[in-house]
Image (cartoon, rainbow, N blue to C red):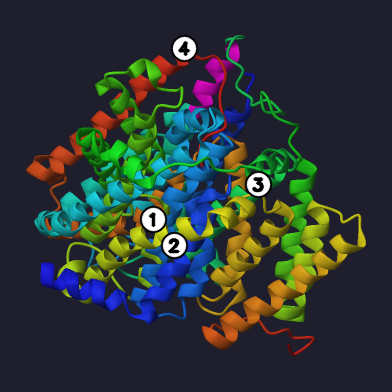
Amino acid sequence: MLELLGQGIVTVLQWKYMLPLLLGTFAGVIGGSLPGFTITLTVIVILPFTYGLDPLAGLAAMTGVYVGGSTGGLITACLLGIPGTPSAIATTFDGFPMARNGEPGRAIWLGVWASVWGGLLGALCLVFVTGPLAALALQFGPWEYFSLFVLAMAMVAGLAESSLLKGLVSTALGLLITVVGTDPIGSVPRFAFGSEFIGGGFQFLPVLIGIFAFAQIMTDIEKQGDRRTKTASAVRATFERFSHLKLNWEIFRQPFLLLWATVVGLIIGILPAIGGSASSVMAYDQAKKFSRTPERFGKGHPEGIIASEASNNANVSGSLMTIMAFGIPGDAVTAVMLGAMTIHGIQSGPLFVSQNPGLAYGIYGAYILAHPLMLLICFACMPLMLRLTAVRLAVLAPVVMVLCVIGAYALNNTMSSVYVLLIFGVVGYVLVKMGFPLAPLILGLILGDQIEINLIRAIMTDDNLWLFLTRPISGGLLAAAALSVALAIWQHMRHQKRTTGDEEPDM
Amino acid sequence: MKLGRDGIAGLFGLAVSLLLLPHALGLPRLPIVPIGPGFYPTLVLAFLGVTCALLVLQDAFAQRRPAMPATAPETTPDGPPRAYGLVAVAFVTVAAYVALLPLLGFRIATTLFVAAFQLVLERPSTLRQWVALVAIAVGTSVVTYLVFERYLTVLLPRGSLTGW
């Protein structure tokens, strides 16, 4: 295993892979640091550039975006009090007060170093645990896969911030999109109504790009003006004198904090579609609970920054584990990666590592190397990054839109994918405005085909539907799904008692 | 029965579900598969219908309670008013770009789109800003064309009217 990992790292060290990884990491740090841009949007923007590349080069670029973006979000979180990405939300709680107290350099670099160490600890698990997880996944039959996908959807629908019902409706809409087109067994056309345009069904990536990118950009356009005034303060930020050695000592003198935050990030990352924001907030919460000085949290406490940043970078490795072992995207970023893999004809899932060891260990290598690269980028380009956080939306939005159109068009060189992009762009924006979370829709969209195929396979093998409940793993997964929904109902009821208004959901 | 935003959305979803259900149920069965191609879509539509119906009911009950407003405010609690008109114009601009792409080709349509979209979002007031706008529009078109077509060998749309 270590030999393969060594080969993977050596492979990625070649310029052919190193350049995309470096550019991806750079784009990730920049994209992550732009408030409202998000890692998902950055990876969508990078996607069309990967079409013409070797699969590993493309995936290395995306891995770089993921790692860089998870760290980039902390820059504006510390300087402006606005998380560049949702996964940096908990960094804001202490990073911003620390920066306001005259230590912006310490706040940012403490976060950067915690990200590096959390991410590298996560890499250990990525390398050593993905294999056993894939071996476990190999024990799965169609019943277990069906139940696993149901669990994933129940969890993500249950986590919807607005309401459980809206999360479930969103999931159903995602599933509905996948049934348009021909059925997977007999190729019988469904819901095409004689139209050639939708007769072949909707391709996953134009739908995803449309829903996410348009919803994001249009929501930013709604708030035009607000962003410019807030980002202006970033440019004026100057760093105080501080020692990187002392910052690292601050991190390593509390090894339990670093380890526990990493473990929380990993577990949340492995659980499908929960995402970095949950892991950062949960790690922050745990750090506060275990801290000897909980009263200092929220006032610029380094422990808060370390927990949040170590956790959200470890979360990346957890998400990569899920996609590589089970073929389920851990979040929207890995959903795009899954789409990119499909374009290159690569099937992720339990056999992915054993059938594509070069690619799998190359991804591990890219993930590991992305951390020192991200550190180098932060060292070299921090002043530039501070300037770039002030890029005007009027410049950013049209460029992003052009790249989205290229991303959709280049899939099969037809305008129909661009039309799909536009249609689902409108749908995504309307859904966000109606208060529907997009994450369950995307998961339904990704898993819809697989759910149907596994359901049919299970019934074709044995038409006894009770097997879904009586097979131990399948039954356990369905019970966990039911528990997840029940827990969500309980939490929403408790939440409703406390609040009176309703909120626009987290996309 | 008074309904809010969620209730209307739920009714719409319920209507979609009920409209498509007969089509799913009418799909032909295949002799080799114990369940037909309509089985799974029926499950999905039933799931959509039930959740949407529950959403309508939830909203109807919420509307009865005066303390629980079901519609979102037009402005954020501490932010500026939302520029929905600007969003509508932005969508129209993107739609025009998509419509013009196959006619004018990637290079011309992209230059026009990037310039127009910048104008929609922020009107330049000085000569320098106008120059920057044009430079960004032309630059985006040229750089993306060179990177994608020349370096990454990704084909971009050609215009039926221009041949570009």
Instruction: Say which mark, if any, is on residue A67.
Output: 1
Q: Are marks 3 and 2 in contact (CB under 8 Å)?
A: no
Residue A209 on image: x %, y %: 53, 59
Label 2 neighbour load within 10 Å: few <14, some 14-19, many 20+: many
Horizontal placement of A221 versus A499: left or right?
Answer: right
Which residue bears the numbered disc 2? A25
Circles 2 and 1: CB atoms closer than 8 Å:
yes
From this viewpoint, is residue A204 visible? no
Q: Residue at x 33, y 51 (%)?
A: A116
Q: CA distance from mark 4 to mark 3?
A: 39 Å
Name the residue that disc number 4 marks: A498
Residue B139 at x, y percent in the picture: 72, 74
Secondary structure character of the magenta stretch overall: helix
Front: mark 3 or 2: 3
Mark 1: few/some/many CA within 10 Å (<14, 14-19, 20+) = many
Instruction: Work out whether mark 3 precedes mark 1 in sequence or the reverse, and give the earlier one.
Output: 1
Q: Residue at x 54, y 69 (%)?
A: A407
Q: Magenta part of the protein: which range?
A: B55-64
